[in-house]
Image (tube, grey):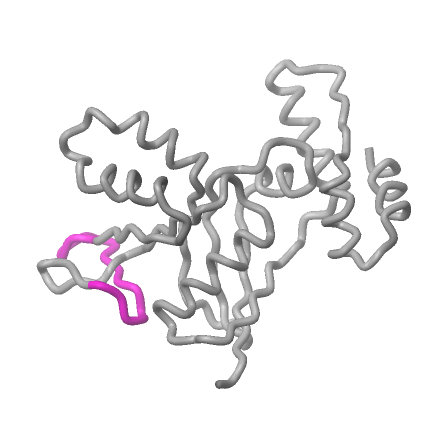
Amino acid sequence: MNTQKIIVETTSADLWWGIYGLDVKTGWEDITLFDESGEKIGWLCLCTKSYLRYVLEDLIDDEREIEFTDVIKRHLSGNVCNYWFCYDEIGDEDFFEVSFDAPKNEKGIKPSYIEIFHPNEGIDIETIKSAVSTFAKDFLKIGNCIVEVICDVSIEESIKSFKENQERLGNGNINVLFTDELISELSERWKMEKEQVLDKLNVSI
């Protein structure tokens, strides 16, 4: 089977705060998928267990959301990816269906977008790669998928935006600490020795 590449764009600053160890890893992120030629495949809302526990707590007594909360409960008790499909109504001004094969609702409509529930607690690069690989296999019929996450947010930019956000919230005297786990992850990603990674991180503060 031929190997195919999917390129992923992310959207939020707090994703990178978590990846760089400045804050807890975010529990959800909207991601956009492109093929190798740059053509847009679609987009997903990636949700992890930490976020879904919060959603469940918020909706647990809402009888209109029983089907949704049942799916969340099943996901939280397992260790695989699951999906939730959202559909537009015929006649909606911005009606949209995904271009690939996906489950149709009782009206024969394909989803307008898909949420993928991942068993991880928070989102990092490997979470994104794992989720997209699973999605590609399930919906795009790509069994051997290389996932490239565009990293266009530097550690310097992340620290700057993180500090600015904390200051807006009234949190002064921000002390940024880098964990051994983060240093090991960045050492592998940046192809640098751990000491060099730590030096780069310290300079960026």
Q: Position of residue 173 (x, y in %)?
A: 76, 16
In this rendering, the count of numbered labels is 0
Residue 94, by quadrant, is bottom left
138 shown above or below 75: below
Outermost bottom residue: 1
- Kindly identify the residue that appears in the image at 32 percent across and 53 percent down: 83
- Kindly identify the residue that appears in the image at 74 percent across and 56 percent down: 189
Question: Residue 182 in magenta?
Answer: no
Q: Position of residue 199 (x, y in %)?
A: 90, 41
- Kindly identify the residue that appears in the image at 55 percent across and 42 percent down: 12
118 shown above or below 100: above
**167 to the left or right of 42:** right
**50 to the left or right of 57:** right
Q: Position of residue 160 (x, y in %)?
A: 73, 34
Q: Which residues are magenta?
A: 88-103
Q: Position of residue 121 (x, y in %)?
A: 50, 39
- Kindly identify the residue that appears in the image at 18 percent across and 41 percent down: 67
Question: Residue 89 in magenta?
Answer: yes
Q: Main secondary structure of the magenta part?
A: loop
